[in-house]
Image: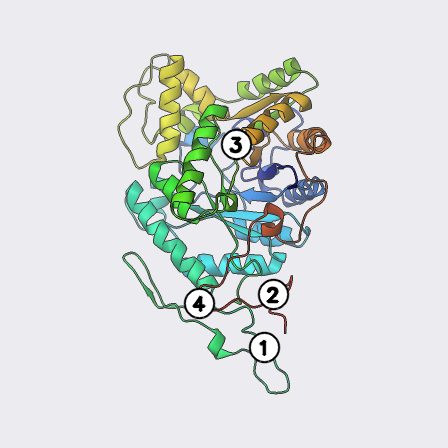
């Protein structure tokens, strides 16, 4: 009999809270997003709670909102993900280390090297969140006057994935013989030169790093548009889905895993983890009061900037207490824009109300007691709305402490979450297979990723 299905849990930690008011909440650490000792304590608490992964989103611009909003943002200064995760790898042993890296404004060789290095440094715990980057201010930092077209970004991303994974396969697992007597360090017959020449990319290779311990770092994807879903079905092993209703989650889950089946991929080879904003209280009323207090700390300047960014269209010139106007197609994230427009039409929300939601957090939220929250998470898991969640904490450190100290034990009591890690690598803990090298026959691999003799 197969063991009961359990939740997979990631922690969304850059910013440490997605909520604009988080740094102002009573008792919160205002500089938590840029405080290394604090971040070190957070990841160690998450590892003690047996979380699967510590995830760092990334953005490539500061001036991505008006200064009146920017001056209120706790994300204006953040650590570069690879630098921070490499440092955190040395103070942890099992928790996964996931980071966003852009296929639009970076080069495949750079990304392949960084993730291969992180995987080796961490003992096999790296994960790459493939993001195409929709931000006109980021474009200006990389020599472009405007964003690249949405679908064009995804076509480049698909080729980019092929190049990066090909570079990770540059060496067979047993290529590095390191024979002291003969003086042979590696076997050239076990090295592959990629020589990729495609529509968007030209990369010779090989990568100057041994094959990652996991074969490939875990592939993560977050797009929910038509192009994003197809990219996920073809490439992703973890999907950070946009959280909404359970019914919407079930539809997304069925769609993406159905696409996997059509192209011959095993749906169990992907874990879908919607973002979930969690506020814990001793009672439902207390939890709601915490959420209301937090939301009240969002200034309109911040909210309207968040709304404009999500829509990819500036609505600040319209009546704040009037309805949302028609939003033309843009190069912004289509899934985010569509969710906002749908909410505005469904609930007859004004621009001010939408700004309040956008500046706080408008996605999936579990607000209640540990038992209430566990009930909802269990329903998502059992009804195939998700395989787990990417947890967003409302404020730090209290919000994180509430979850790991109160919700995790309730999930464990129900048998819905592990009490010990299953393995040493991120793939092992997520239940994902180690990919074969496309250029070399497989060899027997030890836990350290070196072929056994």
Task: From the image, tell me which residue sits under label 3.
Answer: 384
Q: Position of residue 236 (x, y in %)?
A: 46, 47
3D distance between C-alphas at marks 1 and 4: 18 Å
3D distance between C-alphas at marks 2 and 3: 34 Å
Q: Nearer the viewer, mark 1 or mark 4?
A: 4
Q: Secondary structure at mark 4?
A: loop
Please give the label number shown on residue 177.
1
Check disc 1: other Cα within 10 Å, few if <14, some if 14-19, many if 20+.
some
Instruction: Examine the rendered structure and indicate whether residue 188 appears above or below residue 149.
Output: below
Question: In percent of the image, x 48 and y 78: which residue is there?
Answer: 188
Task: From the image, tell me which residue sits under label 2.
Answer: 445
Give the quadrant of residue 119.
bottom right
Q: Position of residue 18 (x, y in %)?
A: 52, 32
Check disc 3: other Cα within 10 Å, few if <14, some if 14-19, many if 20+.
some
Q: Residue furthest bottom?
A: 182
Q: Upstream in the sequence, badge 2 or badge 3?
A: 3
């Amino acid at each position: 009999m197969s063991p009961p299905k359990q939740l997979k849990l990631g922690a969304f930690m850059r910013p440490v809270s997605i909520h604009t008011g988080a740094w102002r909440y009573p008792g919160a650490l205002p500089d938590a997003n840029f405080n290394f000792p604090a971040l070190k304590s957070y990841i160690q608490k998450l590892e003690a709670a047996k979380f699967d992964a510590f995830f760092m989103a990334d953005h490539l611009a500061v001036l991505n909102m008006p200064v009146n909003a920017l001056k209120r943002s706790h994300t204006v200064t953040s650590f570069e993900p690879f630098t921070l995760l490499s440092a955190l790898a040395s103070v942890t042993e099992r928790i996964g280390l996931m980071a966003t890296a852009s296929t639009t404004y970076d080069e495949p060789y750079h990304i392949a090297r960084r993730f291969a290095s992180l995987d080796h440094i961490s003992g096999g715990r790296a994960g790459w969140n493939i993001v195409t980057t929709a931000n006109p201010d980021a474009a200006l930092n990389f020599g472009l006057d405007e964003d690249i077209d949405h679908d064009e970004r995804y076509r480049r991303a698909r080729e980019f994935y092929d190049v990066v994974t090909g570079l990770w396969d540059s060496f067979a697992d047993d290529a590095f013989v390191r024979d002291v007597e003969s003086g042979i360090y590696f076997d050239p017959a076990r090295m592959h030169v990629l020589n990729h020449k495609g529509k968007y990319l030209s990369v010779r290779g090989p990568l100057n790093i041994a094959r990652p311990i996991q074969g490939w770092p875990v592939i993560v994807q977050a797009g929910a548009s038509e192009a994003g879903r197809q990219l996920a079905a073809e490439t992703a092993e973890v999907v950070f889905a946009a959280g909404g209703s359970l019914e919407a989650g079930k539809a997304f889950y069925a769609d993406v895993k159905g696409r996997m089946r059509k192209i011959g991929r095993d749906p169990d080879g992907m874990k879908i983890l919607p973002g979930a904003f969690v506020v814990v209280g001793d009672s439902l009323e207390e939890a709601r009061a915490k959420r209301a207090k937090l939301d009240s700390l969002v200034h309109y300047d911040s909210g309207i900037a968040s709304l404009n960014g999500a829509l990819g269209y500036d609505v600040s010139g319209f009546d704040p207490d009037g309805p949302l106007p028609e939003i033309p197609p843009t190069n912004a994230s289509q899934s985010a824009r569509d969710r906002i427009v749908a909410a505005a039409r469904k609930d007859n929300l004004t621009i001010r109300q939408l700004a309040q939601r956008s500046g706080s957090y408008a996605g999936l939220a579990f607000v209640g007691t540990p038992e209430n929250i566990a009930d909802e998470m269990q329903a998502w898991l059992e009804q195939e709305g998700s395989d787990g969640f990417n947890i967003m904490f409302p404020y730090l450190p209290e919000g994180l402490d509430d979850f790991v100290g109160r919700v995790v034990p309730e999930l464990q009591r129900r048998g819905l979450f592990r009490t010990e890690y299953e393995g040493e690598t991120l793939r092992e803990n997520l239940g994902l297979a180690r990919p074969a090298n496309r250029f070399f026959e497989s060899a027997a691999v030890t836990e350290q990723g070196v072929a056994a003799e």
